Amino acid sequence: MTENHTLTVRDNRTGEEYELPITDGTVRAGDFAKIGKTDDEPGLAVYDPGFTNTASTRSAVTYIDGDKGILEYRGYPIEQLAEKSTYLEVAYLLIHGELPTREQHDQWVHEITFHTFVHENLKSQLQGFRYDAHPMGMLLSSVGALSTFYPEARNISDPQIRHDQVVRLIAKMPTLGAWSFRHAQGKPYVYPDNDLTYTENFLSMLFKMSEQKYNPDPRLAKALEVLFILHADHEQNCSTNAVRSVGSSQVDPYSAVSAGIAALYGPLHGGANEAVLKMLKRIKVPENIPAFIEGVKKGDEKLMGFGHRVYKNFDPRATIIKKAVDDVFEVTGVNPLLEIAQELERIALEDEYFVSRKLYPNVDFYSGLIYEALQFPPEMFTVLFAIPRTSGWLAQWIELVDDKEQKIARPKQIYTGDRRLDFTSAEQRWS
Ligand code: ACO
């Protein structure tokens, strides 16, 4: 730290000045606690609902530069990973921090592949859900239930035990996700096929019927692989923060990850691609686009799938997804909504309203179209997000567990309620 890497704060209530160190572009919230502190009064605190300008951790997992449209996992650009890697290799990278050697890769893939089965009692639990249960509700409760099958998972300080649960979680998520999907359709659950790759096996568990062996179209498996890579991590988003916050109590990783699934379930986080699809269906034909855009500009509604809190130039994931759209439609036939989406994008990107506000297509603008072409109902879209995000959640969880600076997450509050009221008993109040 050099001399001028400090912040001088003058407390005008007392005239006192404080010098706070600046490290990595941040000041420590704890340093503010020294300001104005007396025997009777606590020092200053910072107020930041939604953590919009608060760093909660140091992390070496994922780097984002929203202005430049950069996303990197462990330093590797997302474009290169999506083009040249596989989801399981990316999961290894996120978890271990570096790319695997051939032996490490083969061992990792072997371990994940041979942990895809779940205990039969968990199958009974899934079967107990109502016929119309939301697959995300089924997924989050079954991942929570996994902790009861592996009680040793509570020992989070043992690296080998941690590794075993990481493998189990990444391996079993597609099984639980696919079974939640089959459940809603009243179809029998399909057991994992260990001859297939991670995404091929997922497709098999989703779509296999009476055939002896399900042979997924490699173009679909590849498109899913790309989507999984794009969704694997996105630094301190709402669900990752939930995993870290719950994990900071030192609970087992199944419980922490189920908190992440719960956070992802919410419409402000994992549900935007479903809204895009509904919007495109409502617009129906390209001729209706100009009137729709006018409505958006008047503030009647939003152009769903456009804009992002962090990306203010372009969302690099959207560019990659556009390519995957072509591959999927080559197999499934073109979704008529694609024409509307493309025309909508063309018009919006030329319109001063969207240009001046730096609104560009985000990852959700095209992903819903792919999912629909693959015959997923909208309720499944968030499950398709949760499966690959598991590796990111776990990478962040391991980082948390190893981070000596981390403490149990416990924010402060500004109390706004009553004080020191006199309690009268119910009998007296109601007489
Ligand atoms: N359509 C029309 N106008 C928009 C849109 C949109 N999609 N997004 C933002 N704006 C406008 C706002 O009305 C605001 O205009 P104003 O300055 O005239 O008031 C301006 O652009 C800035 O928008 P904010 O809401 O301040 O931007 P913020 O960063 O808070 O929101 C968000 C980002 C939530 C993603 C927003 O752009 C949005 O709601 N988009 C649509 C939903 C969506 O696609 N979400 C998926 C995000 S990707 C993901 O989570 C995986």
Image (spheres, grey):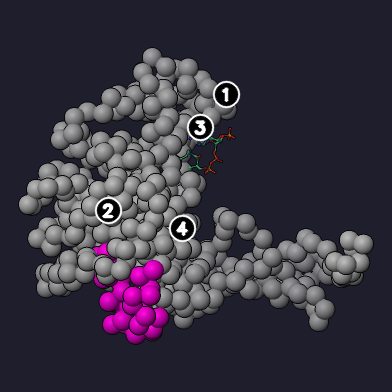
**In percent of the image, x 76 and y 74: which residue is there?**
42
Q: Nearer the viewer, mark 4 or mark 3?
A: 4
| C-alpha distance separating marks 2 and 1 | 42 Å
| Quarter holding residue 424 | bottom right
Tell me whether the residue at label 2 lies in contact with that at label 1, contact meaning CB atoms closer than 8 angstroms: no
Query: Which residue in the protein does label 3 denote?
Result: 302
Q: Nearer the viewer, residue 416 or 140?
A: 140
Q: Nearer the viewer, mark 2 or mark 4?
A: 2
Query: Which residue in the protein does label 1 denote?
Result: 298
Crowd band around label 4 with a 10 angstrom C-alpha radius: few (<14), some (14–19), many (20+)? some
Q: Quadrant of the C terminus?
A: bottom right
Give the magenta-colored segment's residue range: 145-174
Element class at badge 1: loop
Query: Which residue in the protein does label 2 denote?
Result: 178
Dot label at residue 262: 4
Tell me whether the residue at label 3 lies in contact with that at label 2, contact meaning CB atoms closer than 8 angstroms: no
- Residue 253's x, y, as percent? 39, 72
**In percent of the image, x 34 and y 59: which residue is there?**
126
Dot label at residue 96: none
**In percent of the image, x 17 and y 66: which residue is there?**
113
